[in-house]
């Protein structure tokens, strides 16, 4: 286990215990509140992926996360690609109210009914695409798969890969 894993685990634990001093220190290092909030939403798999990054690349990783994980951007992408409210809550941590507001802003209706069932041969290729992106956090990984298969909703794709 690298020192970056220990460091990230310490940050994660401090944030989970709502240590405001940790938040202030991280902001002093240049991390935005949004980035700090994203760290608190990591699950164990995503934490392990982030921790596998070499310590000297954390600054570059912070810049990459600022672009890729901008909550507004990724929320818009998820909504535009037909993600269910449950999926958005699970991956992005938004409340029902926040999701409803975002849907109104984008003039998108709430998804109702069952997601489209994907045929078995296509499911196999989707699973292969999912497996090929194993180094990415799940939220980003699912978005990449959705970009490869734009004819299916994110909800339908998640039903295949979960």
Image (cartoon, grey):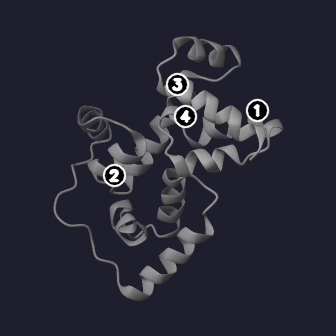
Whether residue 26 sits left or right of residue 37 in the image: it is right
- Image position, residue 46 (x, y; %): 56, 48
The tag earlier along the polypeptide, 4 or 2, is 4
Residue nearer the viewer, 22 or 84: 22
- Image position, residue 18 (x, y; %): 47, 19
Q: In which quarter of the image is residue 12?
A: top right
Q: In this view, does 17 lie above or below 78?
A: above
Q: In this view, does 39 lie above or below 117?
A: above
- Image position, residue 57 (x, y; %): 79, 39
Q: Which of marks 4 and 2 is in front?
A: 4
Residue at the disc numbered 4: 39
Alpha carbon of mark 3 to alpha carbon of mark 2: how far? 24 Å
The tag earlier along the polypeptide, 2 or 1, is 1
Image quadrant in which the C terminus is located: bottom left
| Mark 1, other Cα within 10 Å: few <14 / some 14–19 / many ≥20 | few
Residue at the disc numbered 3: 15
| Mark 3, other Cα within 10 Å: few <14 / some 14–19 / many ≥20 | some
- Image position, residue 27 (x, y; %): 63, 16
Alpha carbon of mark 3 to alpha carbon of mark 4: how far? 8 Å
Residue at the disc numbered 1: 59
Residue at the disc numbered 2: 87
Helix, strand or loop under label 3: helix
């Amino acid at each position: 286990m690298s020192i970056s894993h220990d460091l990230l685990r310490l940050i994660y634990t401090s944030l989970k215990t709502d240590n405001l001093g940790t938040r202030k220190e991280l902001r002093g290092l240049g991390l935005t509140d949004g980035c700090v909030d994203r760290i608190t939403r990591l699950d164990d798999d995503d934490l392990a992926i982030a921790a596998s990054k070499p310590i000297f690349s954390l600054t570059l990783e912070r810049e990459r996360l600022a672009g890729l994980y901008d909550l507004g951007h990724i929320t818009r992408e998820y909504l535009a690609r037909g993600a269910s409210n449950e999926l958005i809550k699970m991956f992005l941590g938004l409340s029902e109210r926040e999701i409803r507001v975002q849907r109104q802003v984008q003039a998108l209706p709430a998804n109702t009914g069952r997601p489209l069932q994907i045929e078995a041969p296509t499911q196999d290729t989707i699973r292969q695409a999912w497996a090929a992106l194993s180094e990415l956090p799940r939220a980003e990984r699912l978005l990449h798969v959705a970009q490869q298969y734009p004819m299916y909703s994110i909800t339908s794709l998640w039903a295949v890969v979960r």
